[in-house]
């Protein structure tokens, strides 16, 4: 296990090019199970979750060739099996293989997945959707076992909540299903559009991705494609918040700022000085920032994946703030750790009350989930003195070696083995 040692009062200069989105790349990699032709993906981020997903797909016989930022996957020789629990438990996105396996083999057995400990994160909506397409499920000894009578059959699937993962699972399952599928109350995240665009470039017939209703007309097979993964809006948002906190001129490039509208609105309300361009956001210093109230919501609302980061910022601005977390019930694990660094945050049910005008002071802290970990990095960058962040495993799942990416831009960050 590694730890990060971060010197406080960091400087930040220059710009950063944001790489491909982890949350887009994961389902795109999985979609290789649906085709026996090459799937070539570029702009792949170098992350632990991406490595784990490749390991998982290799277990199913997907052949994988890696070249720098590009990866070629081929699912011609895939076979059905039970995936290694050790991989599945590390990554909730493993459940995304369920739909494609049912579609290809008519049966699948997967252990219930793990991932960040940010809530109970059930898979009932995934199962409900796949049931509508004709699958039957049993949960036994920690495994979900699915069976289909011959083929998945297109149908109307009404989701009780616009779950991102469930929408992706059902979308992938229905691409080769017989007939038409309509996903109602689908998730509208940009990563859903990315998946639909890639599948369409493989010959799928999907329309409406990015809206509440997605229509899929089943096709017999998919063809070869070459697809560039969307840039990571959460990594982009994290760097924008970092620059606002450090209060220096900085540019976050190779992004689609439109995907960050809710963050940009919130930061501008706080008084941040942002220039939004076509593929970048420029941050300039500002005299005074003030607290605001926000709540997380499905896209296009404020992303839960940026909640911990903006909370770190809220601690050092003028006045108090509130954040209501409506997506995950246990996503305030960064609060005690931010408080150890000098924040004054109290949580009551799903709302965090953040006192402003605090000054972070370096201290030893423990990283819990992925985005919580990076909020500690942001606080540490602005702190007086040295912060040691233990258990950075989760950080590596979603941010490319942060000591290098950020380290190049001014901050002093060192990684050590514990
Ligand atoms: C995805 C993202 C994650 C992000 C989340 C919400 C990936 C790999 N991860 O996670 O970074 O924080 O979207 O934007 O893309 N739920 C159920 N039953 C289900 C499925 C979900 O109750 O079957 C609940 C979850 O417990 C959670 C909420 O729905 O409270 C949202 O989950 P969902 O949108 O599915 O998130 P993920 O796809 O897991």
Image (tube, helix red, strand yellow):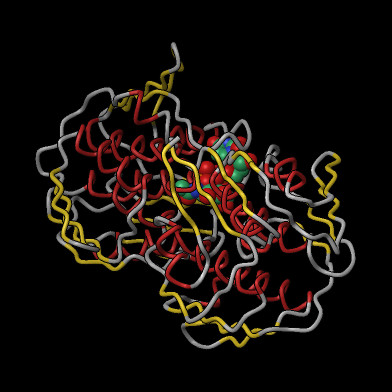
Ligand 1: which quarter? top right
From this viewpoint, is residue 158 visible?
no
Q: Is residue 409 above or below residue 32?
A: below
- Residue 30 versus residue 212: which sits nearer the camera? 30
- Residue 141 versus residue 376: which sits nearer the camera? 376
Where's residue 98, x and y in %? 36, 34
Where's residue 368, x and y in %? 59, 38
| Residue visible at 33% across and 23% down in the picture | 109
In which quadrant is the C terminus drawn?
Answer: top left
Is residue 217 left or right of 93 when viewed as pictured? left
From this viewpoint, is residue 344 visible?
yes
Q: Which residue is outermost to the right? A: 319
| Residue visible at 79% across and 55% down in the picture | 323
Is residue 403 left or right of 349 when viewed as pictured? left
Q: Is residue 109 above or below residue 310?
A: above
Q: Quadrant of residue 195?
A: bottom left
In which quadrant is the N terminus drawn?
Answer: top left
- Residue 317 versus residue 155: which sits nearer the camera? 317
Q: Which residue is outermost to the top? A: 141
Where's residue 203, x and y in %? 23, 62
| Residue visible at 66% across and 42% down in the picture | 328
Is residue 366 left or right of 92 when viewed as pictured? right
């Amino acid at each position: 296990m590694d730890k990060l040692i971060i010197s406080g009062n960091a400087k930040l200069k220059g710009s950063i090019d944001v790489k491909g989105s982890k949350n887009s790349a994961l389902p795109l990699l999985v979609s290789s199970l649906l085709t026996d032709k090459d799937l070539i993906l570029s702009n792949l981020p170098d992350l632990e979750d991406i490595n784990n997903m490749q390991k998982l797909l290799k277990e199913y016989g997907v052949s994988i060739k890696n070249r720098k930022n590009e990866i070629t996957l081929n699912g011609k020789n895939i076979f059905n099996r039970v995936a290694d629990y050790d991989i599945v438990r590390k990554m909730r996105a493993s459940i995304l293989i369920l739909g494609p396996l049912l579609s290809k083999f008519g049966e699948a057995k997967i252990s219930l997945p793990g991932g960040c400990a940010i809530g109970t994160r059930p898979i009932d909506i995934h199962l409900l959707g796949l049931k509508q397409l004709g699958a039957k499920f049993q949960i036994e000894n920690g495994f979900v076992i699915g069976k289909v009578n011959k083929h998945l059959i297109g149908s109307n699937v009404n989701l009780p909540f616009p779950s991102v993962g469930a929408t992706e699972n059902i979308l992938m399952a229905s691409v080769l299903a017989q007939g038409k599928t309509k996903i109602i109350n689908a998730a509208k995240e940009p990563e859903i559009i990315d998946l639909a665009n890639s599948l369409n470039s493989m010959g799928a017939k999907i329309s409406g991705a990015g809206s509440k209703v997605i229509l899929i007309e089943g096709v017999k097979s998919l063809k070869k494609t070459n697809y560039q993964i969307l840039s990571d809006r959460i990594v982009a948002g994290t760097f924008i918040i970092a620059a606002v906190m450090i209060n220096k001129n900085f540019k976050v490039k190779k992004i689609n700022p439109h995907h960050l509208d809710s963050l940009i609105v919130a930061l501008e309300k706080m008084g941040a000085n942002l220039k939004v361009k076509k593929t970048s956001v420029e941050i300039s210093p500002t005299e005074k920032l003030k607290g605001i109230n926000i709540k997380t919501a499905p896209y296009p609302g404020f992303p839960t994946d940026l909640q911990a980061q903006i909370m770190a910022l809220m601690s050092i601005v003028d006045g108090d703030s509130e954040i209501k977390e409506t997506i995950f019930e246990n996503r305030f694990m960064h609060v005690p750790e931010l408080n150890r660094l000098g924040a004054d945050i109290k949580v009551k049910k799903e709302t965090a009350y953040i006192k402003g005008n605090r000054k972070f002071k370096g201290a030893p802290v423990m990283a819990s989930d992925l985005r919580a970990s990076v909020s500690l990095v942001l606080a540490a960058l602005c702190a007086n003195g040295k912060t040691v962040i233990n258990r950075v495993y989760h950080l590596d799942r979603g941010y490319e070696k942060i000591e290098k990416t950020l380290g190049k831009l001014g901050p002093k960050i060192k990684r050590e083995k514990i």
